[in-house]
Amino acid sequence: MESIRVLLVDDENDFRRTVAKRLTKRGMDIRQATGGEECLNILKKDPVDVVVLDLKMPGMDGMETLHHIKNSCPGTEVIMLTGHATTRDGVDGIKAGAFDYLSKPIELEHLAGKIRQAFEKRTREDEKQKEKDFRARMEQQMIATERLASLGTLAAGVAHEINNPLAIIKESAGWMKSILQKKELAQMPRRGDFEMALGKIENGVERARRITHQLLGSVKQTDATLSKVDLKELVEETMVLHQKEADQKGVQLLETIDPGKNVIWSDPYKLRQVLINILSNAVHATDAGGKITVTAETSEDHATLTISDSGRGIPGEHLKKIFEPFFSTKPTGEGTGLGLFVTRSIIDKLGGEIEVESRVGQGTQFSVKLPKHPDVKCNSNKGSYKGQNDERA
Amino acid sequence: MVRIPTRVLLVDDEEDFVEMLSLRLKEAGEQVSTAYSGKACLDILAQDHIDVVILDIRMPGMDGMETLGEIKKRFPLVEVIMLTGHGSAETAVDGMKLGAFDYLMKPADFEELTHKLQGARRRKDEQEERIRQAEARLLMRKSGGTF
């Protein structure tokens, strides 16, 4: 157990030193100060658990020091020593936030006991605070998760309904186009205008089609088909798909996975989709001369794939949103904003977790942690982010 | 060379879609019939010669998968290409296991559709050709190899 950090503040040197020595013997970590100012300076640099504070001191007295301590480090507990003063001073001290008071002359055993009590109170309060923070964080995450889930379901429903009218628009435009290409219409006035506009309709439909298909892909993941997946093989296969684009950009694709050692049970098709999404983002975000590395690590019941790029990075304000549907920093029409949303929902369904870390100008790293033997369709949802100042344009 | 049109039966409950796609396929030189339900599809198959059925999976009443099962039972040589609006390939893959030639996601790319249509047509032609040859051999054997 770590020792209790105590700061003794008293201008009577002999008394303070004796107490310090005897408390040290009892396993406490003692610092000393001769007055209020020194006490506050020490606390500023190195916080302690409990301050034992003499009330009557020259310069800044005990009460004033107490106020300062409670202002600047409210978590620190203070025990007042009232010496020859009256009990009332001690009571005032408690009212001002001290843990308790003792009257000089003190019995050392008594003081040590009080210090321990004060420390326990502090520990309890720390734990309470931590629990509170944790709960607040969880609640926030739950809200975000639920919001995403309902958004996703709604969006998929809309996507489905839109596919049919899209198909009608597409076939109508295509039909008109094929009529325009007929010999008898070769002399039609402003034929080029019609063709141009029909082309625009087709492009528009194609864009909408990409969105609806990705959305439906994210929600309609019915049954995962599990089989043995060698992560090395999967990564190699997927990299081949991106090799051409990477070569054109002058980006290096690397993979340093031990053969045969990273084998898990999972859905190879879904997993490949995950890899495709992450890798294609990485290629997009990395400029000539950059490098994308995929590594794998296996523990007893998990395997973690890490995809790192030396690209532009993702700024902090974007990092929070990258898993949300329709968030994209690509120019309108190029990104659907669904890639990572889909990626995350796939990983959730495979019982895994995805994390991202990114630094502006240095690169981004995605870690995908997957269970070796997944309990498919557990509803855990843990896409999380932790990032500082980052950039991906 | 004169191109022999593929006899296509287009089945979907979306009437506008059926109408437009059939116009387009006709424009491309195919011979197209249409049906708005699985039942109507089977009725047409019973009467007319059809090479390839383009079948929507999601239809009210008798759905695409059920229709596919009936087609393969009653008209095993007719090829089927499935259209799925689900955006999920799983059902379509199940359909292929039941004997469908291939599937397309809605809204489908016309080039891809014509490509798959040709593939389906070719498979049917080849199968029919094999049957003819087998029948011929059978006839030869029965007639003792002499005419």
Image (cartoon, coloured by chain):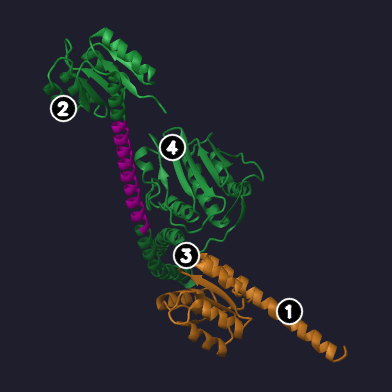
Chain colours: A green, B orange
| For discs 1 and 4, the disc positioned in front in the rendered view | 4
What amino acid is found at the position of numbered circle 2 in the picture?
Ala
Q: Quadrant of the N terminus of chain A?
A: top left
Tag 1 and tag 3 share a subunit:
yes
- State left or right for residue A97 relative to residue B30: left
The residue located at (48%, 45%) in the rendering is A281
Residue occupied by mark 3: B87
**Distance in Å between CA atoms under marks 1 and 2:** 100 Å
Callout 2: chain: A
User: Is the residue marked by circle 4 packed among few (<14), some (14-19), or many (20+) residues within 10 Å?
Assistant: many
Residue occupied by mark 1: B130
> Residue A31: x and y, percent?
32, 16
Residue A100 - label: none
Q: Are marks 4 and 2 in contact (CB under 8 Å)?
A: no
Label 4 vs 2, first from the N-terminus = 2
Magenta range? A120-149
Q: Main secondary structure of the magenta part?
A: helix
| For discs 3 and 2, the disc positioned in front in the rendered view | 2
Residue occupied by mark 2: A96
> Residue A372: x and y, percent?
57, 50
Residue A358 - label: 4
| For discs 4 and 2, the disc positioned in front in the rendered view | 2
Numbered disc 2: secondary structure: loop
Callout 3: chain: B
Q: Nearer the viewer, residue A77 or B77?
A: A77
| For discs 1 and 2, the disc positioned in front in the rendered view | 2
Q: Quadrant of the C terminus of chain A?
A: top left
